[in-house]
Amino acid sequence: MNTEKIQQPFKDVFPGDLSLNTMQRQTPHVLFCDVVPEKFPKAELLLFNDKLSEETGLGTLNPEQDLPFLAASSYPSDKIPYSTAYGGHQFGKWAGQLGDGRAILAGEIISDKGIHTELQWKGAGATPYSRHADGRAVLRSSLREYLMSEAMYFMGVPTTRALSLVKTGEKVVRDVMYNGRPEEEDGAVMMRTAESFLRFGHFELISASGNKELLQKLMDDTIERYFPEINPDDPQRYLLWLKSVAVKTADLVVEWFRTGFVHGVMNTDNMSVLGLTIDYGPFAMLEDFDLNFTSNTTDLPGKRYAFGKQAQIAQWNLWQLMNAVYPIVNDQQGLQQILGDFGKYFWQKHDEMTASKFGFQTWVATDTDFFTGWQHLMQDLQLDYTLFFTALEGWLKSGQPEPFSLENISYKHLNDSEQQPFADFLIRYQERLLSESSDRESAILLMQKNNPKFILRNYLLYECIQEVEAGHTEMLSHLLEALQHPYEMRYPELCIKRPEKYNLVPGCSMLSCSS
Ligand code: AMP
Ligand code: MG
């Protein structure tokens, strides 16, 4: 791999703490701290993403030579790695300085095609931002992030990506259930990539420190680097930038709704200014359709981060970003306008997206009522979100008049009278389809493009993790293959509803933040 091509433009531009002081502390007025990652002499390479490596410009893997880099033990001698400072609102409250507590940046690489990619190790040891935690990651959650971020990529959802996964050969202690029974688990270091890992929280933290000059510098640099379509001399550039962040964020959440992704911890420190899915923790793919489903056990009391609330929370997070940059923008009306437009833009895109899942070429006003009725039906009959659309497509293709069976897509046993509303719904659906100007084949094509058939369900991840922890990698390879073709029914055995035995297993329907 061409690690000598790594640059550190962020460090070249912004103030940082170069002391290599490992003490965990507040770091006012700097945007990063240099950090020496931990050494893992027993490291073992478990996963490597060859295609991504080529795309980024890192090139081909030489396992023996490159393992130390992927395990964070070796890097270009003049490029000391660094962790960045950010703050955030967690569960609706300002949490002050957070920062990269277990993420360390190697820097950035530019491919021959001009693609910029930041390279970040996760789990390579404590940083000044570790706040009494260990800076480590366990294999369990690193596998979840590796596989899910790649699954999102192949579904077409903006996301950070996974380059490699290394088993550190060390044990890490975690109390998964938060019940005072900590256990040893395998440790891991993942290298992940993104055009930028900048979060809303980076802007919030500098703003909270009152350093307007640095805040403006970060805004200008972000615009110049990542929003080339905005003229840096335009007096309206900050509003244009925020508008773009709002649009990217709305587009992202529409994609989460399309695929059934529940992030689980939409704190402002987990929101990318580039509109990427970032920080895979207690996420889940929605199974039985439930707008009120939260995958995060910590979120249970208020269900702030439930599936159906994700747009509202994204808007709330944008509001915090706008509060943070207000001292530079100084245009309350302009900011309010962007926030207001977010809702309108999101719901329009959301409705168009939902229409496409049903095979409707355009959204029409009566669809709102149709969608609401359908959502109630899904919740009442506990139907699997993904399997429902697979079945609907199959039914359309078959041209059969009688309703399809719900047995394999419902999480409860339905008697005949309970199924009647479903039969009524299908009649309504057919009427709506007939009102379309295009034919059934076009509807089916549209459905095939918008409805993933394979989704990475938590129970699959759970089974895979158990196997990998026991030293078997067959299922891991199988999932890695399946997730690259989410819109095809290549592996029907992986496209089934969650088996009943997993209903109450932690890590299958609900997850803690412990990672
Ligand atoms: P998260 O909830 O994972 O987004 O993390 C919130 C904050 O806690 C971020 O600053 C993380 O870097 C930090 N953090 C989470 N887990 C650890 C860990 N094991 N060691 C150090 N910092 C951590
Ligand atoms: Mg985070």
Image: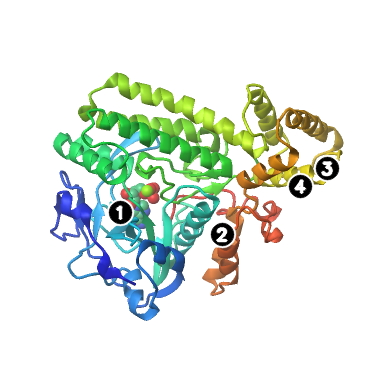
CA gap between label 1 and label 2 equals 31 Å
Crowd around label 2: few <14 · some 14–19 · many ≥20 (10 Å): some
First in sequence: mark 4 or mark 3? 4
Is residue 166 visible in the rendered image? The answer is yes
Mark 4 highlights which residue? 394
Q: Is residue 26 left or right of residue 496?
A: left
Query: Is the C-beta separation of discs 4 and 3 under 8 Å?
Result: no
Crowd around label 3: few <14 · some 14–19 · many ≥20 (10 Å): few
* Pick the front one: 221 or 132: 221
Looking at the image, is 248 positioned above or below residue 177? Answer: above
Query: Is the C-beta separation of discs 1 and 3 under 8 Å?
Result: no
Q: Position of residue 105 (x, y in %)?
A: 28, 58
- Helix, strand or loop at label 3? It is loop
Mark 2 highlights which residue? 484
First in sequence: mark 3 or mark 2? 3
Mark 1 highlights which residue? 101
- Residue flagged by tag 2: what amino acid is it? Gln
Q: Position of residue 240 (x, y in %)?
A: 31, 31
Is ligand 1 within 8 Å of the beta carbon of the residue shown at mark 1?
Answer: yes
CA gap between label 3 and label 2 equals 30 Å
Mark 3 highlights which residue? 399
